[in-house]
């Protein structure tokens, strides 16, 4: 089937994902350690702050998604939100990455307020942005290609975000120590601000929204958002992805601590680059496999490969950097698929929601999806940081054996367990290509006022 979305528009749609990756790796991986070890915030309280902000996101994400469903403007439903969210995001990012000299309490407050504004602005951009992608096409395989291009751009942006601190440190001739760390993170923020602005404006200008979608004009409520959870495929997909995301976010948060205090190598960037490069290089092959065997089987295979290989890092210790690099590459083989394929499956679920309700609910569903991702990330931090503090973690020092063992358990074993549990839940997901075609036929019948049957319900 010929692609209906021109390549120029596909690239313009993918561009913000590349730029917004700065909100991923630096915030989840680098910034907590920067604030605990350089700025002076208490490690346990950092975990509580992250959880509190994520709990607020549990309200803001679905509300912004629902409001974008109901927005009417010359730019459409989604693009006004993207345009208006950019200025507060780049300003808050710069301030968060450039804290002044502060007391421990002041550092915690600066971290909390800055992160709150960043995530609120980020939500205002990303939830409508992802909703826009879900409605660009209803073709089962084309949407996999488009959303994989977006998530591939996200991985490439993450690679740049992972490497940028080391690149900037070398380019500016910065040494070690707190002052060098502060200068490095300030330069990261300054370099990313124009990229975020240009990428988001390109998307707003070039990507045209589809018109004619039906959505309620009533204000969102807990009842309307709760109604989305009656969508069985969405409920299964959301539950499995959330459980697996808890597993994947723990290593993302703890990798600087694991690499430094377990492996004995302070250069975390090289391992992140190996992981993400492997994921993005293999992503086109997973897209082809998904077209051949279906999205769910390809996703399950990728997730199982990640989990089973990553568990091996539990058995490593000081000096095992080469073995760790091999396991990082092995676990990265399926990374791109675990990111992109659930996004494409999510878009199929939205089509089924239209069959159920008669309205397009991209914003509400993706808002709830965003909540699950953020709460999963916050839960990992909330779980890990207080535990590390309780077993005797000391910043910038040799760690006692209890801390090393705890790091290995939290970094390797707990994530693998959560990932395998998520796989078991995902096994029950019911939409394949044949079922999706029947869903679209039923949607067309419903739009025309004809009789229709739900293909996922037993006759």
Image: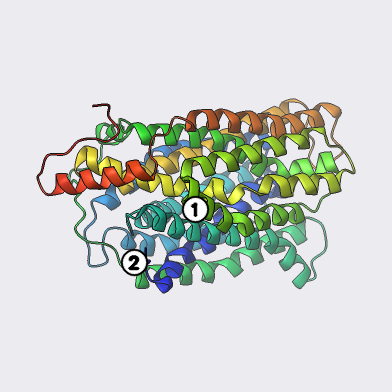
Front of the two marks 1 and 2: 2
Residue at x-position 47% and y-position 72%: 198
Is 93 situated above or below 251? below
Q: Quadrant of residue 100?
A: bottom right
Q: Is residue 34 left or right of residue 346?
A: right
> Upstream in the sequence, badge 1 or badge 2?
2
Q: Is residue 131 left or right of residue 379?
A: left
Residue at x-position 70% and y-position 59%: 182
Task: Give the numbered dot on residue 4.
Answer: 2
> Residue at label 1?
118
Of the pair 447 and 191, the residue shown nearer to us? 447
Is 194 situated above or below 61? below
Residue at x-position 43% and y-position 49%: 344
Residue 67 drawn at (x, y percent): 28, 49
Dot 1, crowdedness within 10 Å: few (<14), some or many (≥20)? many
Of the pair 352 and 185, the residue shown nearer to us? 352
**Element at label 2:** loop
Residue at x-position 67% and y-position 55%: 278
Q: Is residue 205 left or right of residue 273?
A: left
Q: Quadrant of the C terminus?
A: top left
**Element at label 1:** helix
Q: In the rendered structure, are the residues bearing label 1 and label 2 in contact, judged by CB atoms less than 8 Å apart?
A: no
Task: Give the numbered dot on residue 1.
Answer: none
Residue 283 drawn at (x, y percent): 58, 55
Residue 134 drawn at (x, y percent): 36, 53
Residue 16 drawn at (x, y percent): 47, 63
Give the CA distance from mark 1 to mark 2.
35 Å
- For the question of whether residue 190 can be seen, the reply is yes
Dot 2, crowdedness within 10 Å: few (<14), some or many (≥20)? few
């Amino acid at each position: 089937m010929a692609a209906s979305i021109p390549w120029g528009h596909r690239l313009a749609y993918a561009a913000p994902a590349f730029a917004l990756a700065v909100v991923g790796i630096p915030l989840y991986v680098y910034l907590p350690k920067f604030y605990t070890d350089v700025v002076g915030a208490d490690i346990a309280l950092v975990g509580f702050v992250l959880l509190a902000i994520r709990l607020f996101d549990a309200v803001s994400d679905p509300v912004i998604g629902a409001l974008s469903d109901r927005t009417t403007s010359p730019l459409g439903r989604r693009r006004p939100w993207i345009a208006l969210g950019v200025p507060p995001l780049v300003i808050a990012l710069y301030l968060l990455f450039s804290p002044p000299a502060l007391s421990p309490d002041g550092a915690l407050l600066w971290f909390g307020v800055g992160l709150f504004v960043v995530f609120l602005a980020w939500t205002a951009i990303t939830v409508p942005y992802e909703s826009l992608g879900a409605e660009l096409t209803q073709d089962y395989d084309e949407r996999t290609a488009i959303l994989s291009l977006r998530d591939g751009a996200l991985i490439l942006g993450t690679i740049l975000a992972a490497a940028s601190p080391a690149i900037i440190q070398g380019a500016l001739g910065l040494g070690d120590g707190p002052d060098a760390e502060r200068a490095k993170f300030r330069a990261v923020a300054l370099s990313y601000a124009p990229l975020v602005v240009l990428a988001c404006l390109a998307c707003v200008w070039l990507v045209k929204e589809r018109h004619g979608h039906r959505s309620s004009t009533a204000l969102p409520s807990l009842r309307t958002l709760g109604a989305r959870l009656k969508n069985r495929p969405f409920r299964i997909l959301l539950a499995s992805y959330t459980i697996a995301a808890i597993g994947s976010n723990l290593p993302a948060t703890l990798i600087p601590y694991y690499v430094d205090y377990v492996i004995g190598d302070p250069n975390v960037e090289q391992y992140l680059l190996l992981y993400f490069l492997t994921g993005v290089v293999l992503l086109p092959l997973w897209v082809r496999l998904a077209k051949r065997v279906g999205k769910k089987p390809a996703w399950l295979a990728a997730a199982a490969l990640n989990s089973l290989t990553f568990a091996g890092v539990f058995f490593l210790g000081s000096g095992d950097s080469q073995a760790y690099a091999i396991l990082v590459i092995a676990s990265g083989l399926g990374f791109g698929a675990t990111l992109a394929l659930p996004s494409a499956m999510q878009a199929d679920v939205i089509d089924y929601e239209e069959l159920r309700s008669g309205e397009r609910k991209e914003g509400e569903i993706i808002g709830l999806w965003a909540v699950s991702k953020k709460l999963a990330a916050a839960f990992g931090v909330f779980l890990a940081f207080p535990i590390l503090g309780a077993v005797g973690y000391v910043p910038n020092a040799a760690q006692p054996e209890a801390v090393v063992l705890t790091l290995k358990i939290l970094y390797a074993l707990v994530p693998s367990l959560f990932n395998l549990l998520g796989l078991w839940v995902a096994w029950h997901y019911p939409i394949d290509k044949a079922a999706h075609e029947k869903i679209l036929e039923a949607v067309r019948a419903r739009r025309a006022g004809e009789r229709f049957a739900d293909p996922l319900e037993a006759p």
